[in-house]
Image (cartoon, rainbow, N blue to C red):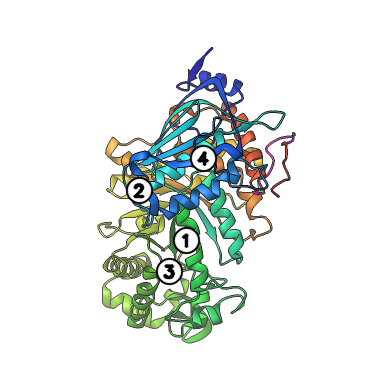
Amino acid sequence: MASCTICLPALMILVLDLNTVESVWPLPQKLAISEERYPLSPTHFNFYYGEDQASIMRDCSLLDSAFTRYFPLIFPDLTSGNGVLPSTEEKAFSLVVTMHQKDCDGYPNEGSSERYQLNVSAGQAVLNSDTVWGALRGLETFSQLVQQDEDGTYFINKTEIEDFPSFQYRGILLDTSRHFLPLKAILNTLDAMAYSKFNVFHWHIVDDPSFPYQSRTFPDLSSKGAYHPMSHIYTQSDVRRVLTHARLRGIRVIPEFDSPGHTQSWGKGQPNLLTPCYKGSSPSGTFGPINPASALSYTFMSQFLKEVTSVFPDPYFHLGGDEVNFSCWQSNPDVRAFMQKMGFGKDYTKLESFYMENIVNITSNLNKTSIVWQDVFDYHERHSFLKVVEVWRRGCYLCELRKVTKAGLQAILASPWYLDQPVPTRNWARYYKVWPLAFKGTEEQKKLVIGGEVSMWGEYVDATNLSPRLWPRACAAAERLWSDESQTRSAEAAFPRLQAFRCSLLRRGVRAEPLSPGHCRNEYRGI
């Protein structure tokens, strides 16, 4: 057999038998691979721009940084040298990169193309992409195609790939309020996300327990609301470092500042923001959600959102809006009076809707597209001011996707990919078998499902267990959101690749849990 093309699950197993793409994850859309192989030497390996682009792309620092980063990932045993020798070397192998657009100075966004083509033949591999973001995805795939034989010799097989994501939004949520995550843990997670081709970091940065974001406009929010005002905060410099680290890996950073609920930590540094709760006719000394009946609340939120939307460059911004407890609002006489004035009666979902519509409008005026949790959609009788709804509640998430898209709104699926609970790693298959488009609806509705994300909430997760709880189970969602569903229906067929990819993660320093009894060669080298 000279070559084979993956187009059916049965052929997928045949390719795996070649022992050449066993760790390629997620599976490319179209893949043809041959038994013909070419040796690679780190001292005779070069990255090049295409000849017609050498002068144009000379200033693409983003891609230059990727070349530097990927060289030791391609050749993990190399301890010295940069692998750059004259192209006249007889045994030299080159990876030639050509891009149709020079977009090296910006940030990835919701419209960024990640499409690429990769052809590997004798002496060189050619990587063509529309954008630098596609080039980054192609570099990752190339790095996974390089293998080592039992003697440690590097090689790569003759390969043709045409690849692109099935969904544009492929995210991971980290919660840095319930347990503060050191900057290093966030940066390491971004690295691992790039290996699996995730492209959105949903940063649930603040919540009830703590407010670690250091605001320029309202410094008391973190100085009084963080677990510690010095050691457990993210400074503006820290945020810039996260943004830069993510950008270099083609990852968007979408922050979430959830309100009106989940805001207990906000009240410590911002007086008169939260609703005073009452016991009978007297204040109880406790506080509830942000006070939607006070004009001061909207003045503060306008100023605060103006700051944070200027800090985070992504066009999308998450406003939360979930799990609002109405009991404090119900107890407060001023809120009740406001309800009557507005004609809301005793329906406190209308009060929450009033607040969220105001906050969404503020954000829209700052040129941001708002994402909200599904509660906001469920509680609203009209949805004209909404754009993107994240589906998170248990139950029939496909039913919710159908309702959201029938209303003409974009949807992000999170419900089946909550990984914060400690369950056996073997449960990865249940995450792998999620079909986001399996609901009854029109093709136009299904186009409105822009993707999904893995949620790692922080009640029982900190830097000590973040990585093993996340990886490799999150990889199941990564392949579901990237690859062709018709080619990845079998968890059994995918298992050998995931097993091998988990070994690659270990070698790259990612503390990924084991999937079954066994071992990885050099498994603790990067740990």
Tell me what residue is drawn at x 33 percent, y 39 percent.
Answer: 446
Marks 1 and 4, the one that precedes in the sequence = 4
Count neighbours of disc 4 (C-alpha within 10 A) and say few if under 14, some if 14 to 19, many if 20 or more.
few
Q: Tell me: 515 left or right of 57.
A: right
Task: Identify the secondary structure beneath mark 1.
Answer: helix
Q: Are marks 3 and 1 in contact (CB under 8 Å)?
A: no
User: Comparing marks 1 and 2, which lies closer to the viewer?
Assistant: 2
Q: Nearer the viewer, mark 3 or mark 2?
A: 2
Quadrant for residue 491, please give it: top right
User: Secondary structure under badge 3?
Assistant: loop
Left or right? Give the position of 508 relative to 283. Answer: right
359 shown above or below 458: below
* Among numbered discs 3 and 4, the one appearing first in the sequence: 4
Q: Is residue 307 magenta?
A: no
Q: Element type at marker 4?
A: loop
Please state the extent of the stretch shown in magenta in the rendering.
Answer: 509-519
The residue at which mark 2 appears reads as 55
Tell me if I can see residue 249 in this picture. Answer: no
**Tag 3 near tag 4, CB within 8 Å:** no
Distance, label 3 to label 1, CA atoms, is 27 Å
The disc, 3 or 1, on the residue closer to the chain's N-terminal end is 1
The residue to which callout 4 is attached is 86
Please give the residue where the numbered disc 1 appears in the rendered image: 244
In space, the residues marked 2 and 4 are separated at their CA atoms by 18 Å
CB atoms at circles 2 and 4 under 8 Å apart?
no
Q: Residue at (48%, 56%) from the top-left corner?
A: 246
